[in-house]
Image (cartoon, grey):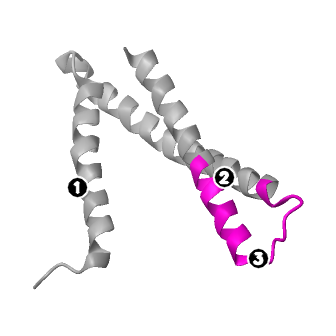
Amino acid sequence: MAIRLRSGPPLLLGIGISATIAPAMSAGTTGAKAQDAGIASATVNVAQQIGGSVGTPLLNSLAASALASFLVGEDATSQTVQTNAAVHSYTVAFGGTSAIFAAGASSAA
């Protein structure tokens, strides 16, 4: 059975997530003593859960604010304006994500 074109992005996402999560978990517990392995793993899992529960709403709020500010003074019923506002909000959210990743990378180094 051939993979359909619309299956490509989710497939790439799955490959990317699986290629990053396991090494990140491994890096988070590397160097822990054998007797501290459980608490090291728990700390990494808690950090991941907090990041997901705080980061997602934060970036959603950032994107929503960017969308709303883009629409100020524009014809919000126009399909082109709506599309441009959506692209702007995604760009701002991805920029915020990049800043968070850069801050995390610099603090981990």
Callout 2 amino acid: Ala
Quarter assignment of residue 12: bottom left
Task: Give the x, y percent position of residue 49.
Answer: 46, 43
The outermost residue toward the bottom is: 1
For residue 37, side relative to residue 85 (left or right): left
Q: Quadrant of the C terminus?
A: top left
The residue that mark 2 highlights is: 63
Q: Distance between the residues labelled 2 and 1?
A: 26 Å
Helix, strand or loop at label 3? It is loop
Q: Earlier in the sequence, mark 2 or mark 1?
A: 1
**Magenta segment: does it hold 87?**
yes
The residue that mark 3 highlights is: 78
Which residue is at 33% across, 26% downward? Answer: 39
Front residue of this view, candidates 84 and 55 = 84
**Magenta segment: does it hold 90?**
yes
Front residue of this view, candidates 78 and 92 = 78
The residue that mark 1 highlights is: 15
Q: Nearer the viewer, mark 1 or mark 3?
A: 3
Helix, strand or loop at label 1? It is helix
Front residue of this view, candidates 81 and 48 = 81
Q: What stretch is highlighted in magenta?
A: 70-91
Task: Give the x, y percent position of residue 76.
Answer: 81, 71
Q: Quadrant of the N terminus?
A: bottom left
Task: Give the x, y percent position of residue 40.
Answer: 32, 25
